Amino acid sequence: MYLPKRKPTRLQGYDYSQNGAYFITICTHDRKCVFWENHAGAINESTEIKINEYGKIAEQIIERLPDRYYITIPKYVIMPNHIHMIIEITENEKHQENKEIRHYRSVTDKAVGYLKMNVSKKMHNTYPGKIWQRSYHDHIIRGDSDYKKIWEYIDTNPIKWKLDCFYTDEKTV
């Protein structure tokens, strides 16, 4: 059976374990709308996100990630079928004590893996089927203007849902 070779998505030669900021996008399997009560959102509609029980599970796990890894997550949004986050890798004293994290290939890989695994475990009994798309997309944030642009994108993503590249008019699970 022929399997197509996957294109590498990472910047060749870049050390993803070094301090810095990364824009992460994690999609649900087959772009199924899993995380919102009502995902109709459009321009000029309410900016209030009404995440459902699954979205709350994802939110709880995201908020615990900085306790487990030497990262901060200054901004994130849970969309109906994907999650956007800014992950900043830092080396503060709190995390220097945890030497085992130094063995990881990439902190973002482990943080995303932990998020996916734990959300899946908590949803397992009530959600039918696969939850996550394989892998995730990351972007190295290069400078203040890039950071501000991504921050604004995350802020406005919910009110621009119908214009989003991940939009689907599928009803929430």
Image (spheres, rainbow, N blue to C red):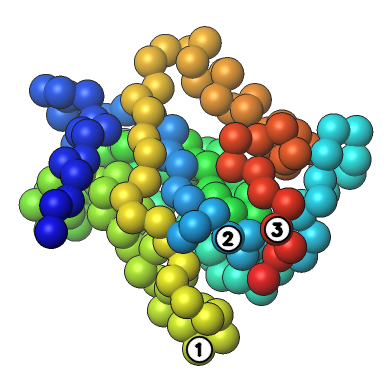
Left or right placement of residue 154 versus residue 4 in this view = right
Q: Position of residue 104 (x, y in %)?
A: 14, 51
Q: Amino acid at mark 3?
A: Glu
Label 1: few (<14), some (14–19) or many (≥20) C-alpha neighbours in 10 Å: few
Q: Position of residue 40 (x, y in %)?
A: 81, 51
What numbered label is drawn on residue 152?
Answer: none
At 17% from the left edge and 51% from the top edge, which residue is drawn?
A: 3
What numbered label is drawn on residue 125?
Answer: 1
Mark 3 element type: loop
Label 3: few (<14), some (14–19) or many (≥20) C-alpha neighbours in 10 Å: few
Left or right placement of residue 99 versus residue 56 in this view = left
The answer to which of marks 3 and 1 sits earlier in the sequence is 1
12 or 93, which is in the foreground?
12
Q: Which residue is mark 2?
A: 32
Give the Cα distance between marks 2 and 1.
Answer: 18 Å
> Contact, CB < 8 Å: mark 2 with mark 3?
yes
The vertical placement of 120 against 142, above or below, is below
Residue 145 can be seen, yes or no: yes
Q: Which residue is mark 3?
A: 170
Q: Amino acid at mark 2?
A: Lys
The vertical placement of 16 against 173, above or below, is above
Mark 1 element type: loop
Q: Nearer the viewer, mark 3 or mark 1?
A: 3
Q: Position of residue 91 (x, y in %)?
A: 26, 38
The answer to which of marks 2 and 1 sits earlier in the sequence is 2
At 26% from the left edge and 33% from the top edge, which residue is drawn?
A: 9
Residue 94 can be seen, yes or no: no
Q: Position of residue 64 (x, y in %)?
A: 45, 61
Give the Cα distance between marks 2 and 3.
Answer: 7 Å
Label 2: few (<14), some (14–19) or many (≥20) C-alpha neighbours in 10 Å: many
